[in-house]
Image: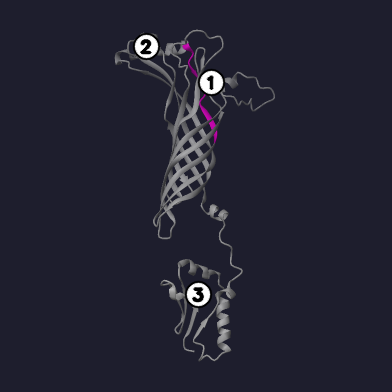
């Protein structure tokens, strides 16, 4: 036989009433070809279930045992040639894991707001315009976090995707309280005199910084819409996302050297340990304290290419603080801020991971 024409079909209805089928023609040599066709693309996809090697062996057997002059067209039923060892379709768990990614964020940053602990009236400086403030702000020296995030596809386009990325993570922040005494609105001619009055006032009030560096352990749940471009292979390339994190923060203060020097350690070479929050700053009968644990919301933006990107994390209300009045103190405490406040920070750096 000069030409072997094999027609394989999975259609159960007559082709006379069908629309023009999708067709795949496979040339198997100079005088042989195999034609696959179906009414829809799904019909052609069903051909994955057929054992083509078995079909070819069956055709060769029939040809060898018949008059080849009469074998011009052979039509086979596909039920007998379904491959029972075909792998099961990908399950939901496998599909979920395919779109789940590990991300790493490494960055540093600075403050976004301040807390004024002491702001005496101008009369305390005996000057009509001079103002004095003892301010506390927060510096973020290092942020490191790891997260497991899943992309839920919302809109799929030929060259782009819009998805919702969500997940959980944990990290650590190395941070610092910065204490500033700021004297402003002083004419040049009065700087020396008014500065001396300011130092004297701070000394009389006993304004003293008590704490600087501290660490924080942070866990969070993250959700962020994510827009990404795709290359010719359908892989994500450039991306941009903006969203929010719900954070739980646990603060661990560093030792206060002044407090440790006043303690006699007996048979304890490493000194004492403390887990309480000591005053951040104190004055005459007043002290500022922070909470050792809290919840808060931060806002995250990311821009990158494939597995490398940049991020900005804005946390305006990170650490609640409050001025505490010490026992036995009477009077209004002129100049001391007796309201609650919050310290915040912004961090930025490098993000690794899809």
Of mark 2 and mark 3, the one earlier in the sequence is: 3
Q: Which mark is residue 9?
A: 3
Badge nearest the viewer, 2 or 3: 3
Q: Residues within 10 Å of mark 2 (few under 14, many from 20)?
A: some
Which residue is pictured at 49% across the width and 73% down the height? 13
What x and y, as percent, mark residue 207?
A: 48, 15
Which residue is pictured at 65% across the width and 19% down the height? 264
Choose top left, top right, bottom left or bottom right for residue 19. bottom left
At mark 1, the secondary structure is loop
- Distance of mark 2 from mark 3, alpha carbons? 95 Å
Magenta region includes residue 213: yes
What x and y, as percent, mark residue 247?
A: 52, 35
In the rendered image, the vertical position of residue 143 relative to residue 21, given as above or below: above
Visible in this render: residue 354?
Answer: no
Which residue is pictured at 56% across the width and 78% down the height? 55
Of mark 3 and mark 1, the one earlier in the sequence is: 3
Residue identified by numbered label 1: 279
In the rendered image, the vertical position of residue 283 relative to residue 77, given as above or below: above
What x and y, as percent, mark residue 66?
A: 56, 90
- Distance of mark 3 from mark 1, alpha carbons? 82 Å
Q: Which mark is residue 122?
A: 2
In the rendered image, the vertical position of residue 143 relative to residue 158, given as above or below: above
Image marks 2 and 3: residues in contact by CB distance under 8 Å: no
Q: Which mark is residue 306?
A: none
Range of residues picked out in magenta: 205-218
Q: Nearer the viewer, residue 43 or 290?
A: 43
Magenta region includes residue 164: no
């Amino acid at each position: 036989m000069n030409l072997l024409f094999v027609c394989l079909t999975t259609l159960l209805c007559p082709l006379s009433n069908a629309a023009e089928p999708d067709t795949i023609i496979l040339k198997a040599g100079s005088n042989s070809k195999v034609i696959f066709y179906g009414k829809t693309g799904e019909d052609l996809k069903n051909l994955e279930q057929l054992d083509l090697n078995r079909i070819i062996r069956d055709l060769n057997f029939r040809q060898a045992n018949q008059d080849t002059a009469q074998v011009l067209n052979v039509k086979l039923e596909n039920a007998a040639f379904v491959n029972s060892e075909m792998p099961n379709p990908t399950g939901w768990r496998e599909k979920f894991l395919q779109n789940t990614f590990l991300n790493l964020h490494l960055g540093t940053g600075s403050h976004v707001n301040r807390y004024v602990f002491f702001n005496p009236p101008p009369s305390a400086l005996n000057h009509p315009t001079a103002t004095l403030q003892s301010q506390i702000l927060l510096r973020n020296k290092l942020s490191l976090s790891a997260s497991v995030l899943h992309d839920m596809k919302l809109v799929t386009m030929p060259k782009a995707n819009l998805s919702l990325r969500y997940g959980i993570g944990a990290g650590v922040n190395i941070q610092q309280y910065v204490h500033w005494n700021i004297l402003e609105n002083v004419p040049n001619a009065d700087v020396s005199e008014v500065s001396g009055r300011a130092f004297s006032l701070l000394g009389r009030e006993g304004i003293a910084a008590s704490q600087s560096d501290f660490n924080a352990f942070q866990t969070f749940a993250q959700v962020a819409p994510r827009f990404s471009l795709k290359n010719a292979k359908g892989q994500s390339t450039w991306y941009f996302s903006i969203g929010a994190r719900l954070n739980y923060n646990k603060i661990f203060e560093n030792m206060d050297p002044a407090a440790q020097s006043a303690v006699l350690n007996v048979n304890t070479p490493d000194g004492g340990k403390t887990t309480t929050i000591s005053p951040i700053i104190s004055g005459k009968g007043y002290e500022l304290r922070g909470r050792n644990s809290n919840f808060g919301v931060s806002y995250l933006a990311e821009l990158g290419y494939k597995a490398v990107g940049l991020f900005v994390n804005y946390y305006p209300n990170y650490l609640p603080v409050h001025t505490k009045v010490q026992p036995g103190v009477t009077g209004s405490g002129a100049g001391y801020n007796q309201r609650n406040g919050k310290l915040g920070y912004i961090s930025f750096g490098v993000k690794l991971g899809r």
